[in-house]
Image (spheres, rainbow, N blue to C red):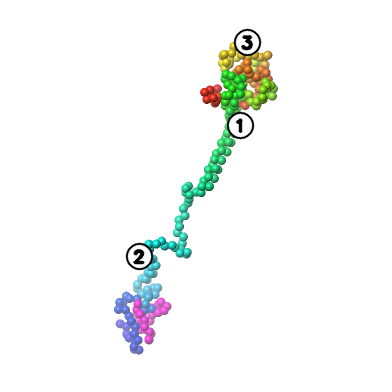
Amino acid sequence: MASLPPDGSRSQVAGDPGAPQSTNGAGRPGAGALGGAVAPGSTTSAAAAPGPGGPAGLPPSPPPSTAPSGPPPPYPVHPGPDAPDQRVERSPGPAGRPVRSRRRRWLVEWAVILVVALVVALVVRTYVAQTFYIPSTSMYPTLKAGDRIVVNKLAFDFGSIQRGDIVVFRRPPAENCGGPPVPDLVKRVIGLPGNTVSAKDGNVYITGKELKEPWLPHTTPRRIYTTMPRPYKVPPNDYFVMGDNRVNSCDSRMWGPVKRTYIVGKVDLIIWPLGTFHFF
């Protein structure tokens, strides 16, 4: 039990031995914390705040909570200027993209599609196939005026030209049949390189042998199918061509054979009119 000092001063001590003890200004236990003696004329209270370490033998007291107690306020609470930004960034979806950006992307996509389509069409037209319009009746009845045909430009790159093939070729320099000049002509191959082509009684002969021509019209009298002024021997790399409408065709009988390098390709099909669509 603490003893009283002889000078009559006093020190209050809590009746509970576990109550906090008095401390000095430095936060360490004071002279009268447990020893019972205090400085003369001073008064200390046992309820003073404990130091960081707390009373001997007891764990440190937790810091006071700063969280607000009670129900949340009925009005929105706005963070102060120093509060961290807690907004969530969301990536814009398709509906959030600007209209101008979507329109620009659409235009770019269509421009690329059109350019690719034009390049493909140009390559196909130059190296693979091409359509032609028939303006005359020199190939009647096989081809009629107004027909549209497709010419295979690769046919003779992977195969040879055969007798009876219908070919499109560039206009030979010797062609002088009158009328407006045209860049391309269409005829049927009759004589191959080295053949001797002749005509007698309306029939065509190849090196003395009569040529069967099922493509000729059957309404015309046979005797006027084909006429030639004289036999003609086809030079190497040249081809002797005629129109199926022999009485109304200006062909190799008038201006000579066609060189191999002038031949554009083989007629593979008629695509117009639709009623005459078929392959050769």
Front-lying residue, 111 or 162: 111
Considering the image in quadrants, where does the C terminus appear? top right
Q: Does the magenta stretch include residue 195?
A: no
Marks 2 and 1 sit apart, C-alpha to C-alpha, by 85 Å
Q: Is residue 228 visible?
A: yes
Mark 2 or mark 1: whose residue is earlier in sequence: 2
Looking at the picture, how far across and down is residue 190, in whole percent? 62, 18
Callout 2: helix, strand or loop? loop
What residue do we see at 35% from left, 73% from top?
57
**What label does residue 70 carry, if any?**
2
Residue at the front extreme?
75
The secondary structure that most of the magenta stretch takes on is loop
Callout 3: helix, strand or loop? loop
Magenta extent = 24-47
Mark 2 or mark 3: whose residue is earlier in sequence: 2
Quarter location, residue 159 = top right
Q: In this view, does 221 lie above or below 97?
A: above
Figure label count: 3
Q: In this view, does 197 lie above or below 89?
A: above
Marks 2 and 3 sit apart, C-alpha to C-alpha, by 123 Å
What residue do we see at 38% from left, 84% from top?
42
Q: Does the magenta stretch include residue 42?
A: yes
Marks 1 and 3 sit apart, C-alpha to C-alpha, by 42 Å
Front-lying residue, 238 or 6: 238
| Residue type for callout 2 | Gly
Looking at the picture, how far across and down is residue 117, in whole percent? 56, 36
Callout 1: helix, strand or loop? helix
Q: Is residue 163 visible?
A: no
Report the residue marked by disc 3. Answer: 201
